[in-house]
Image (cartoon, rainbow, N blue to C red):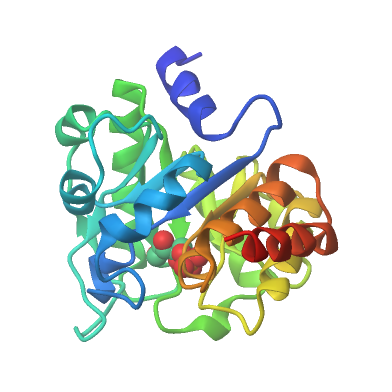
Amino acid sequence: MNWGLENRLSRIIKPETGHALMLAVDHGYFLGPTSKLEVPRETIKPLLPYADALMLTRGVLRTSVDPDASTPVVLRVSGGTSIIGAALSNEGITTGFEEAIRLNASAVAMSIFVGTEHERQTLLNLADLVSEGERYGIPVLAVTAVGKELEKRDSRFLSLCCRIAAELGAHFVKTYYCEDFEKVVDSCPVPVVIAGGPKLDTFKDTLELVHEAIERGAVGVDMGRNIWQSDHPVAAIRAVRSVVHEGASADEAAKLFESAVSGE
Ligand code: 5RP
Protein backbone atom coordinates (compact mmCIF):
# COMPACT_ATOMS: atom_id res chain seq x y z
CA MET A 1 0.00 0.00 0.00
CA ASN A 2 1.18 3.51 -0.82
CA TRP A 3 -0.34 5.40 2.10
CA GLY A 4 0.35 8.90 0.80
CA LEU A 5 -1.08 8.09 -2.61
CA GLU A 6 -4.23 6.52 -1.13
CA ASN A 7 -4.60 9.44 1.23
CA ARG A 8 -4.33 12.00 -1.58
CA LEU A 9 -6.79 10.07 -3.76
CA SER A 10 -9.30 9.95 -0.89
CA ARG A 11 -9.26 13.75 -0.75
CA ILE A 12 -10.60 13.74 -4.32
CA ILE A 13 -12.83 10.64 -4.47
CA LYS A 14 -14.75 11.12 -1.24
CA PRO A 15 -14.87 7.97 0.93
CA GLU A 16 -18.32 9.01 2.27
CA THR A 17 -20.00 8.49 -1.12
CA GLY A 18 -17.27 6.93 -3.26
CA HIS A 19 -17.83 9.77 -5.72
CA ALA A 20 -16.07 12.94 -6.87
CA LEU A 21 -17.04 16.29 -8.29
CA MET A 22 -13.90 17.73 -9.84
CA LEU A 23 -14.07 21.18 -11.42
CA ALA A 24 -11.94 21.43 -14.58
CA VAL A 25 -10.56 24.89 -15.33
CA ASP A 26 -7.42 23.87 -17.22
CA HIS A 27 -8.77 24.66 -20.69
CA GLY A 28 -6.51 27.69 -21.20
CA TYR A 29 -3.42 25.49 -21.43
CA PHE A 30 -4.17 24.92 -25.10
CA LEU A 31 -7.24 27.10 -25.80
CA GLY A 32 -6.09 30.40 -24.30
CA PRO A 33 -8.79 32.65 -22.78
CA THR A 34 -11.80 30.36 -23.28
CA SER A 35 -15.27 31.94 -23.09
CA LYS A 36 -16.31 32.54 -19.43
CA LEU A 37 -12.83 31.56 -18.27
CA GLU A 38 -11.20 34.80 -19.44
CA VAL A 39 -10.49 35.88 -15.86
CA PRO A 40 -9.95 32.56 -14.06
CA ARG A 41 -10.19 33.99 -10.53
CA GLU A 42 -13.69 35.33 -11.19
CA THR A 43 -14.87 32.00 -12.61
CA ILE A 44 -13.27 29.82 -9.94
CA LYS A 45 -13.97 31.71 -6.70
CA PRO A 46 -17.76 31.24 -6.38
CA LEU A 47 -17.54 27.58 -7.44
CA LEU A 48 -14.74 26.52 -5.13
CA PRO A 49 -16.94 25.70 -2.10
CA TYR A 50 -18.85 23.11 -4.16
CA ALA A 51 -15.92 21.33 -5.81
CA ASP A 52 -14.17 18.28 -4.33
CA ALA A 53 -11.08 19.14 -6.39
CA LEU A 54 -9.87 21.75 -8.81
CA MET A 55 -8.10 20.69 -12.01
CA LEU A 56 -5.83 23.41 -13.39
CA THR A 57 -2.34 24.43 -14.46
CA ARG A 58 0.30 25.80 -12.13
CA GLY A 59 -0.04 29.24 -13.75
CA VAL A 60 -3.72 29.61 -12.99
CA LEU A 61 -3.30 28.06 -9.54
CA ARG A 62 -0.54 30.51 -8.57
CA THR A 63 -2.26 33.60 -9.97
CA SER A 64 -5.94 32.93 -9.49
CA VAL A 65 -6.51 30.80 -6.38
CA ASP A 66 -5.71 32.03 -2.88
CA PRO A 67 -3.22 29.75 -1.09
CA ASP A 68 -5.52 29.37 1.92
CA ALA A 69 -8.02 27.47 -0.24
CA SER A 70 -8.67 23.99 1.17
CA THR A 71 -9.91 22.43 -2.10
CA PRO A 72 -7.53 19.69 -3.30
CA VAL A 73 -5.60 20.48 -6.46
CA VAL A 74 -5.26 18.19 -9.48
CA LEU A 75 -2.38 19.75 -11.34
CA ARG A 76 -2.40 19.60 -15.15
CA VAL A 77 1.20 18.72 -16.01
CA SER A 78 1.00 18.05 -19.75
CA GLY A 79 0.92 20.59 -22.54
CA GLY A 80 3.17 22.38 -25.00
CA THR A 81 0.61 22.63 -27.82
CA SER A 82 -2.13 25.08 -28.84
CA ILE A 83 -5.40 24.96 -30.72
CA ILE A 84 -3.77 26.79 -33.67
CA GLY A 85 -0.60 24.64 -33.72
CA ALA A 86 0.21 21.69 -35.97
CA ALA A 87 -0.95 18.86 -33.67
CA LEU A 88 -2.69 19.03 -30.31
CA SER A 89 -1.45 15.51 -29.62
CA ASN A 90 2.21 16.55 -29.52
CA GLU A 91 2.18 17.11 -25.74
CA GLY A 92 5.10 16.83 -23.35
CA ILE A 93 5.34 17.06 -19.58
CA THR A 94 5.36 20.73 -18.56
CA THR A 95 5.55 20.55 -14.77
CA GLY A 96 7.65 18.26 -12.58
CA PHE A 97 6.95 16.61 -9.25
CA GLU A 98 9.09 19.07 -7.29
CA GLU A 99 6.67 21.79 -8.39
CA ALA A 100 3.64 19.55 -7.79
CA ILE A 101 4.82 18.96 -4.21
CA ARG A 102 5.58 22.67 -3.70
CA LEU A 103 2.02 23.43 -4.83
CA ASN A 104 0.63 20.77 -2.47
CA ALA A 105 -1.04 18.93 -5.37
CA SER A 106 -3.27 16.00 -4.45
CA ALA A 107 -2.83 14.49 -7.93
CA VAL A 108 -1.32 15.31 -11.31
CA ALA A 109 -3.11 15.01 -14.66
CA MET A 110 -1.89 14.49 -18.19
CA SER A 111 -3.45 13.68 -21.57
CA ILE A 112 -2.84 10.61 -23.68
CA PHE A 113 -3.56 10.73 -27.42
CA VAL A 114 -4.24 7.14 -28.45
CA GLY A 115 -4.42 6.51 -32.20
CA THR A 116 -2.48 9.64 -33.13
CA GLU A 117 1.06 10.12 -34.39
CA HIS A 118 2.00 11.03 -30.79
CA GLU A 119 0.46 7.98 -29.15
CA ARG A 120 3.81 6.47 -28.16
CA GLN A 121 5.26 9.67 -26.70
CA THR A 122 2.17 10.45 -24.62
CA LEU A 123 1.84 6.85 -23.38
CA LEU A 124 5.50 6.67 -22.38
CA ASN A 125 5.09 10.04 -20.64
CA LEU A 126 2.18 8.54 -18.69
CA ALA A 127 4.21 5.48 -17.67
CA ASP A 128 7.10 7.68 -16.48
CA LEU A 129 4.74 9.98 -14.60
CA VAL A 130 3.13 7.02 -12.81
CA SER A 131 6.53 5.66 -11.72
CA GLU A 132 7.57 9.05 -10.41
CA GLY A 133 4.17 9.76 -8.84
CA GLU A 134 4.34 6.50 -6.92
CA ARG A 135 7.75 7.47 -5.57
CA TYR A 136 6.21 10.62 -4.04
CA GLY A 137 2.76 9.21 -3.24
CA ILE A 138 1.01 11.41 -5.80
CA PRO A 139 -1.73 9.81 -7.94
CA VAL A 140 -1.85 10.31 -11.70
CA LEU A 141 -5.03 11.07 -13.65
CA ALA A 142 -4.84 10.06 -17.33
CA VAL A 143 -7.09 12.07 -19.65
CA THR A 144 -8.15 10.19 -22.80
CA ALA A 145 -7.91 13.21 -25.08
CA VAL A 146 -9.46 13.35 -28.55
CA GLY A 147 -8.24 16.81 -29.56
CA LYS A 148 -10.50 18.29 -32.22
CA GLU A 149 -11.85 14.86 -33.24
CA LEU A 150 -14.90 14.74 -30.97
CA GLU A 151 -16.53 12.11 -33.20
CA LYS A 152 -14.00 9.57 -31.88
CA ARG A 153 -15.91 9.37 -28.59
CA ASP A 154 -17.47 5.90 -28.82
CA SER A 155 -17.24 3.00 -26.39
CA ARG A 156 -14.84 0.96 -28.54
CA PHE A 157 -12.27 3.77 -28.75
CA LEU A 158 -12.73 5.02 -25.19
CA SER A 159 -12.50 1.48 -23.74
CA LEU A 160 -9.21 1.05 -25.56
CA CYS A 161 -7.85 4.36 -24.24
CA CYS A 162 -9.02 3.85 -20.64
CA ARG A 163 -7.73 0.30 -20.49
CA ILE A 164 -4.30 1.28 -21.87
CA ALA A 165 -4.11 4.12 -19.33
CA ALA A 166 -4.92 1.72 -16.48
CA GLU A 167 -2.46 -0.90 -17.78
CA LEU A 168 0.30 1.72 -17.73
CA GLY A 169 -0.55 2.41 -14.11
CA ALA A 170 -2.82 5.48 -14.12
CA HIS A 171 -4.53 5.69 -10.74
CA PHE A 172 -7.73 7.12 -12.21
CA VAL A 173 -8.89 7.98 -15.69
CA LYS A 174 -10.87 10.82 -17.20
CA THR A 175 -12.84 10.09 -20.34
CA TYR A 176 -16.06 11.01 -22.12
CA TYR A 177 -19.54 9.64 -21.62
CA CYS A 178 -20.75 7.59 -24.58
CA GLU A 179 -23.33 5.01 -25.61
CA ASP A 180 -22.60 1.65 -23.87
CA PHE A 181 -20.55 3.56 -21.30
CA GLU A 182 -20.69 0.60 -18.90
CA LYS A 183 -18.37 -1.25 -21.31
CA VAL A 184 -15.78 1.49 -20.82
CA VAL A 185 -16.06 1.33 -17.02
CA ASP A 186 -16.27 -2.45 -16.75
CA SER A 187 -13.05 -2.99 -18.72
CA CYS A 188 -11.12 -0.31 -16.84
CA PRO A 189 -9.80 -1.54 -13.47
CA VAL A 190 -9.33 1.96 -12.01
CA PRO A 191 -11.92 4.64 -11.22
CA VAL A 192 -13.33 6.60 -14.16
CA VAL A 193 -14.53 10.21 -14.16
CA ILE A 194 -16.16 11.93 -17.11
CA ALA A 195 -15.53 15.26 -18.80
CA GLY A 196 -18.58 17.22 -19.85
CA GLY A 197 -17.28 18.18 -23.28
CA PRO A 198 -18.50 21.27 -25.13
CA LYS A 199 -21.57 23.00 -23.68
CA LEU A 200 -24.71 20.96 -24.32
CA ASP A 201 -27.97 22.45 -25.64
CA THR A 202 -29.70 22.51 -22.26
CA PHE A 203 -28.58 22.14 -18.67
CA LYS A 204 -31.06 19.26 -18.31
CA ASP A 205 -28.96 17.44 -20.94
CA THR A 206 -25.92 17.91 -18.68
CA LEU A 207 -27.77 16.53 -15.66
CA GLU A 208 -28.94 13.53 -17.67
CA LEU A 209 -25.38 12.93 -18.88
CA VAL A 210 -24.04 13.02 -15.32
CA HIS A 211 -26.83 10.83 -13.97
CA GLU A 212 -26.36 8.21 -16.71
CA ALA A 213 -22.60 8.20 -16.20
CA ILE A 214 -22.92 7.62 -12.45
CA GLU A 215 -25.59 4.95 -12.99
CA ARG A 216 -23.25 3.14 -15.38
CA GLY A 217 -20.28 3.17 -13.04
CA ALA A 218 -18.42 6.48 -13.27
CA VAL A 219 -17.13 7.60 -9.86
CA GLY A 220 -17.85 11.17 -10.80
CA VAL A 221 -17.15 14.08 -13.09
CA ASP A 222 -14.23 16.31 -13.92
CA MET A 223 -16.36 18.91 -15.62
CA GLY A 224 -15.77 22.42 -16.88
CA ARG A 225 -17.74 24.16 -19.61
CA ASN A 226 -21.17 22.77 -18.79
CA ILE A 227 -20.80 24.29 -15.34
CA TRP A 228 -18.95 27.58 -15.75
CA GLN A 229 -20.32 28.49 -19.18
CA SER A 230 -23.81 28.30 -17.65
CA ASP A 231 -25.52 31.64 -17.00
CA HIS A 232 -25.95 30.32 -13.44
CA PRO A 233 -22.72 28.47 -12.63
CA VAL A 234 -23.26 28.19 -8.87
CA ALA A 235 -26.75 26.78 -9.31
CA ALA A 236 -25.32 24.45 -11.97
CA ILE A 237 -22.52 23.03 -9.82
CA ARG A 238 -24.91 22.56 -6.89
CA ALA A 239 -27.29 20.61 -9.12
CA VAL A 240 -24.46 18.45 -10.51
CA ARG A 241 -23.31 17.86 -6.94
CA SER A 242 -26.73 16.57 -5.93
CA VAL A 243 -26.52 13.93 -8.68
CA VAL A 244 -22.91 12.96 -7.96
CA HIS A 245 -23.10 12.79 -4.17
CA GLU A 246 -26.76 12.54 -3.20
CA GLY A 247 -28.11 10.19 -5.85
CA ALA A 248 -30.54 12.81 -7.21
CA SER A 249 -32.23 12.04 -10.51
CA ALA A 250 -31.84 14.46 -13.42
CA ASP A 251 -35.39 15.74 -12.73
CA GLU A 252 -34.72 16.30 -9.04
CA ALA A 253 -31.45 18.07 -9.82
CA ALA A 254 -33.19 20.22 -12.45
CA LYS A 255 -35.72 21.33 -9.81
CA LEU A 256 -32.87 22.17 -7.44
CA PHE A 257 -31.24 24.18 -10.25
CA GLU A 258 -34.46 26.11 -10.96
CA SER A 259 -35.01 26.93 -7.30
CA ALA A 260 -31.38 28.03 -6.86
CA VAL A 261 -31.69 30.25 -9.96
CA SER A 262 -34.90 31.85 -8.70
CA GLY A 263 -33.23 32.49 -5.32
CA GLU A 264 -30.16 34.25 -6.87
C1 5RP B 1 -8.91 18.96 -21.67
C2 5RP B 1 -9.44 18.66 -20.35
C3 5RP B 1 -10.57 19.48 -19.83
O1 5RP B 1 -10.32 19.81 -18.53
C4 5RP B 1 -11.82 18.68 -19.96
O2 5RP B 1 -12.18 18.43 -21.24
C5 5RP B 1 -12.94 18.93 -18.98
O3 5RP B 1 -13.68 19.95 -19.26
P1 5RP B 1 -15.05 19.95 -20.04
O4 5RP B 1 -16.08 19.40 -19.08
O5 5RP B 1 -15.24 21.40 -20.36
O6 5RP B 1 -14.92 19.05 -21.25
O7 5RP B 1 -9.00 17.77 -19.67
O8 5RP B 1 -8.16 17.89 -22.14
| Relative image position of residue 101 (x, y in whole percent) | 22, 28
| Ligand 1: image quarter | bottom left
Please indicate whether residue 142 sits to the left or right of residue 255 in the image: left
- Is residue 29 something that shows in the picture? yes
- Is residue 183 something that shows in the picture? no
Viewer-nearest residue: 55 or 42: 42
| Relative image position of residue 44 (x, y in whole percent) | 36, 54
Q: Quadrant of the C terminus?
A: bottom right
Viewer-nearest residue: 70 or 120: 70
| Relative image position of residue 220 (x, y in whole percent) | 63, 48
Q: Residue at x 30, y 22 (%)?
A: 135
Q: Dividing the picture into quarters, in which one does residue 138 lie? A: top left
Q: Residue at x 62, y 51 (%)?
A: 238
Please indicate whether residue 208 sits to the left or right of residue 162 in the image: right
| Relative image position of residue 242 (x, y in whole percent) | 71, 48
Q: Is residue 84 above or below residue 7?
A: below
Please indicate whether residue 249 sits to the left or right of residue 97 in the image: right
